[in-house]
Amino acid sequence: MKTEVLSYRDIGISYKDKNVLSGFNLEINMRENILLKGMSGSRKSTLLKLTLGFAHQISGSIYFENRLLDSNNIWEARKFPLQSN
């Protein structure tokens, strides 16, 4: 059984009024290893910054353990330890 831990749903990112990413979707399940590979400037680090609350998307949602991450709970989620079953 797959347990979804992190989910990016229809993420859009803009810099200086220029759309640089749109419609990005990714689901990461418990005990899954992933590799984000791309050229410099392809927004790999930006995805991590979004997850940690250091950057903000213009559209879409990010879910951590099926809870919507937003400015009200991002810091709580960063402290939350994953269950190791």
Image (cartoon, rainbow, N blue to C red):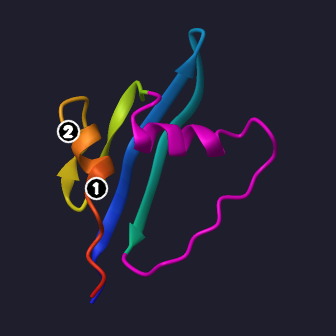
Q: Does residue 27 sit above or below 10 in this rendering?
A: below
Of 4 and 77, which appears nearest the observer? 77
Mark 2 belongs to which amino acid?
A: Asn
Q: Which residue is mark 2?
A: 73
Q: Residues within 10 Å of mark 2 (few under 14, many from 20)?
A: few
Q: How many marks?
A: 2
Query: Residue 2 falls in which quadrant of the image?
Result: bottom left
Which residue is drawn at the image coordinates 46% and 32% (left, top)?
Answer: 12
Element at badge 2? loop
Q: Which residue is mark 1?
A: 64
Q: Does residue 42 sit above or below 85 in this rendering?
A: above
Q: Picture coordinates of residue 40 (x, y %)?
A: 80, 40
**Segment colored magenta:** 30-55
Q: Is residue 41 magenta?
A: yes
Q: Picture coordinates of residue 49 (x, y %)?
A: 51, 38
Q: Does residue 3 sit above or below 13 in this rendering?
A: below
The quarter of the rendered structure image containing the N terminus is bottom left
Of 2 and 18, which appears nearest the observer? 2
